[in-house]
Image (cartoon, rainbow, N blue to C red):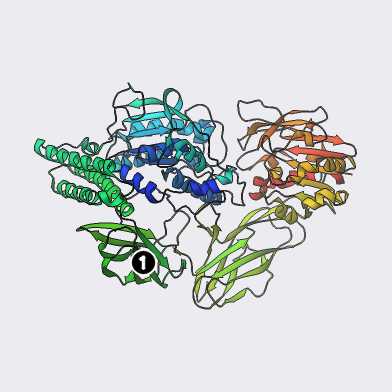
Amino acid sequence: MKKGLILLMLLCMIVFTGFAKSYEFEALSETGLAKTILALQKLPVFGTVFMVGAHPDDEDNGLIAHLAKNLHLNSYYLVATWGEGGQNVIGPELYDALGVLRSQELASAREIDGGEQLHFGAYDFGYSKTAEETFNDPNWDEETIIGNLVRLIRIYKPIIVLGRHAPTGGHGHHQACGVLVPKAVEAAGDPNMYPEQLEEGLQVWDVPKFYQAGSGGININTGKYNYILGYSASQIGSIARGSHKCQGMSGSLGSLGDAFSRYVLLRSTVGTEETSLLDNIDTSLKAISNGIEGGPALISDLNGMLLELNGIANAIVAGFDAMNPLSVGEELLEGLGLVREIIAFAQEADLTRNDKALLLERLALKEEDFVAACNELFSTRVVVEAEDSAIVPGQTVEVTVSFWNLGGQNVDSVKLGLDVPKGWTVVGGEVFEDVAFNQSCEAVFTVTVAEDAPYTDAFDENPITGFAEWEVSGTSVLAEAVADARVVPQVSISTEPERLMAPASSSSIVRSIAVKVQNNTANEISGEVVLHLPVGWELVTEDTSFVLGRENESKTLEIDFMIPANAPLGQSEIVVETIVDGKVFNEGYQIIAYPHIETKYFYKPSVFNVAVIDVKVAADLKVGYVDGGLDINTVYLRQMGVDVTELSPADLAAGDLSQYDTIVIGTRAATARPDIEANSARLNEYVFNGGNLIVQYHKTGEYSGSWAPYDFTISRNRVTVEEAEMKILVPDHPIFNWPNVIGDSDWEGWKQERGLYFPNKWAPEFTPLIDTDDPGEDIEPGSLLIANYGEGTYIYTALVWYRQLDYLVPGGYRVISNMLSLPKVK
């Protein structure tokens, strides 16, 4: 029953679920008359616009709102990456899980600003400074990414492409997009480029206009007040931008008055003389026939029907009466009927295969617009409810589809049904006659999930769609809704933690892993957990069996295993499985849920990594850790053998700090712990009396050098090349010599970057210990600063320790151990 184009790239559109602040509630997707008017205003408009950027938060939200809500164009934001390499200020998700979170924040932003979301297949491996560095990463293969963009351009056929980045300026991913997007625009119209796409049935598309963000071209005023919306597009965009909460954005109502988006025209097939974005572009319904070639009589008939449809659409908008909305109801149904007549005409027309396909694609989009307007004007609603939101392969579940007629006119007939994936079965369905105003009808369906049904992953749409085919005045209209139900494994299994380390030892070491097993079936299940350990390693826990009596019941098994004495150094991947009734399960999911996004299940194989690392720690080392929630370093320090206590605000304010050899301020902890600033004098006193204080990196403005015994200034300097040379400036310093002797190998295998937000100014009491630079640069050596103060030491380190510990990088553990152990130096 679903209409429209089959998307060959991921389209991520979700229902927005709500916010914490009142102004954000006010800006939810329009309802009532506002939503109806927008749907009607879209009827006489035809055209699609692409905006292309590198990351979540690179979009111009105000312009998207202007394009979608003021100009009524199909407006898409194409993002290169999901932002997997970034940071997260609201929760623990990092790497691929962070990508899921950011993808849904993008979808929430689109729900507010009116755009739709597409992704074109690059990966955020972390910050880079140049396009060259970006293209050196295999995830940014130029030919592949350009091909992905070309495919999307050929599918959606935008009349305008807006590039958000230039080939220079910004960081590497931005520059890379500035290089790739113009090439893709050129290639999309060249039949010699990516010919395999044409063999699949796609057609070349020569984009009429290509712009790049920047001054010197057109200025688009997104600050004009919209009476229907109650805001300007700029204000709506400002609120939408607040969806990027994991990047620290809270959103606001923005400013009243003019607000300009500036873009420069780089390429045009329709002329370069212009004063506004849509100059020389036809967005009327007549544009549906643009480029279609056929006999003169055929084209004349087609254009005549399109002009008639254009007239009806404009008459609907002009004749709409807010006090009597249904006064244009018959005209709207007439317009929908005419669209369908034109579709039938096109299907029989003597056109080339490509022209016919193009014409039918365009008409299908306009039919969708008329159908959407009918559902708004006649105030119909479809509600789909499954009795179980987490369904398993082979399960039978009841699904109820309800249709509500909330408009002022009786609906003549309603057919209720379900769309489900191939291989599923559906029993049920019903046709209802005459559903009166403010009344409903419903049908209950029995759905059996296919035995081989794939699990519903974070980037999948939920698989059950309910529909109602309703009819008024002889015209049939389709309404749809998606059930809040997803396919999950019968048994899910996950491990905590996902990574473990063990110091190299001449004695055996026992480690524990928590294995969570959850029953997603309606029946009692029993089974056992199996760990596939490396040769020579032994399972210590004798009983790994479990019984789970009901759906959603879970059990966490603490399982011990032994790493033998003198185990080889390096990482081992350990697969964890459950066996239930002879069937093996080895997947689990992380539920990513926040109030501002749709809940998603992120699937991961049930494996964990164990690294045996040659690292020594000073005996009886006692560490206090001020945790801001942005790293899990305490987990790894304990595995390393360190006695760690997480310090509460009360501990910082009044606890006995002298009991700790070292106190560590967590990564960017000051953003969540204002008590760090409040107790900075007390921390300095701790240092003066012989303590060792280590402060991990903070962004500019998050941590003040004035809180330290001596001033320093945090800059935006960073080193992004993981292999950048590390020049040791004080080779005989204990940090490089005890209890681990640090050599060149300790700087190998680093992940994502060396460090970021290096201090670039510091008091003379500080000594820089390391100098590192990206190729071709020479920045201040502020990645690791140390100062003696009284009897103790103050260390500020901008090296990214948490990523190295996460990835079990041996050198990261060895250098951290030396920094923690500094007070124990003999």
Looking at the image, which residue is at 47% across and 52% down?
16
Q: Position of residue 3 (x, y in %)?
A: 29, 53
From the viewer's perspective, is 455 left or right of 734? left
Mark 1: few/some/many CA within 10 Å (<14, 14-19, 20+): many
Say if 739 sits above or below 234 in the image. Answer: below
Q: Secondary structure at mark 1?
A: strand
Which quadrant is home to the N terminus? bottom left
From the viewer's perspective, is 362 left or right of 720? left
From the viewer's perspective, is 480 left or right of 14? left
* Amino acid carrying mark 1 in the image: Val
Q: Nearer the viewer, residue 37 or 449?
A: 37
Q: Nearer the viewer, residue 131 or 106?
A: 106
Q: Position of residue 145 (x, y in %)?
A: 42, 39
Which quadrant is home to the C terminus? top right
Residue lying farthest front?
323
Say if 502 sits above or below 248 in the image. Answer: below
Looking at the image, which residue is at 56% across and 31% down?
129
Q: Which residue is mark 1?
A: 401
Q: Nearer the viewer, residue 152 or 148?
A: 152
Looking at the image, which residue is at 71% across and 53% down?
636
Q: Position of residue 311 (x, y in %)?
A: 21, 40
Q: Nearer the viewer, residue 209 or 473?
A: 473
Q: Position of residue 107 (x, y in %)?
A: 46, 48
Res. 734 in view = yes
Res. 741 in view = no
